[in-house]
Image: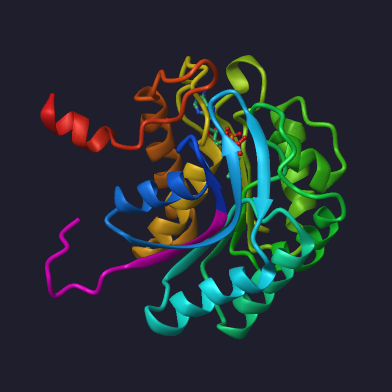
Amino acid sequence: MVINQTSKIPVALTVAGSDSGGGAGIQADLRTFAFHCVHGTSALSCVTAQNTLGVTRVDALSAEAVAAQIEAVVGDIGVDAVKTGMLLNREIMAVVASQVESWNLGNLVVDPVMVSRSGDRLIDDGAIAFLQDILIPLAAVVTPNRFEAQILSGLEIDSVNDMRSAAEKIHSLGAKAVLVKGGGMKGDLRGIDVWFDGTRLDVLKTENVNTTNTHGTGCTLSAAIAANLALGKDLFTAVTSAKNYVTTALKYALDIGEGQGPVGHFFPLLEKTI
Ligand SMILES: Nc1ncnc2c1ncn2[C@@H]1O[C@H](COP(=O)(O)OP(=O)(O)OP(=O)(O)O)[C@@H](O)[C@H]1O
Ligand SMILES: Cc1ncc(CO)c(N)n1
């Protein structure tokens, strides 16, 4: 890609939580945007005290504060794509949905964050129905992991066929496309995702990377999809390129902390210096 000083700089917005450990959430999103040469902007929904072992505390921002951040960014800078991550509660989801509608924001990637890899609950009771009924229908693509896809579809997911059925069921909620992610599947199925956009049902396969340092894969994937959309790629290409980015970032995952380390976003720089 060539970006010179006269090119229009693509801009992406993440509406998500902060991960103090730097592996997921807004920190992962902004790094991912930067490594796609996309200017990253952010609206913080909550602050988690978190590390590679898990989440010890969550503090929500007010819904008004989230709305004000989105307004400040969109009203002045403008955005080419948006991703949502950990939105925590219905009040925050409601202002995000109304901002998306009033600014007519297309290219919306909804990562329906409900639970972390280490098993911590990242959404309030009662917010799931709102996500399902109001936010997901506004999305260009929704990217549930295995656990989230089970909740959204009501199906048990143990095989690729189950992932296909879940993708079809979740598509009927109204998003243009669905990517059911397979990071939480067992054995060889880890790393297999299923795409459905109403006509095309595809199994997306990359190599299964043998690492336990997988913190932030989902945030990185949805941020990379948003970055690719901001760069003007079509939705399916944005998703497959994002998946390739995550696979390489997993190969360069960081072995830090006592638990699950984060994926290594900065591999493009490492490769240049090797
Ligand atoms: N070990 C692995 N090898 C290859 N790809 C993987 C592996 N683990 C996860 N992935 C890929 O990473 C992407 C994110 O999927 P995953 O199911 O891990 O999301 P998630 O559970 O939302 O992530 P997190 O909550 O850790 O941010 C998917 O494309 C998935 O296939
Ligand atoms: C802030 C935040 N967002 C998303 C996730 C999902 O991995 C997480 N663990 N923390």
Which segment did they paint magenta? 1-16
The C terminus sits in image quarter = top left
Percent position of residue 37, x then y? 27, 56
Whether residue 68 is visible to the viewer of this picture, yes or no, is yes
Q: Position of residue 238 (x, y in %)?
A: 43, 54
As for residue 30 lying within the magenta part, the answer is no
Q: Is residue 241 above or below residue 130?
A: above
The N terminus is located in which quarter? bottom left
Please, what is the dominant secondary structure of the magenta stretch? Answer: loop
Is residue 54 depicted above or below 9 in this figure?
above
84 in relation to 96, above or below: above
Residue drawn at x 60%, y 29% as measured from the top left: 183
Residue 120 location, quadrant: top right
- Residue drawn at x 38%, y 32% is 249
- Is residue 14 magenta-colored? yes
Q: Is residue 172 left or right of residue 200?
A: right
Quadrant in the picture for residue 121: top right
Residue at left offset 80%, top offset 38%: 150
Image: 99 above or below 153: below
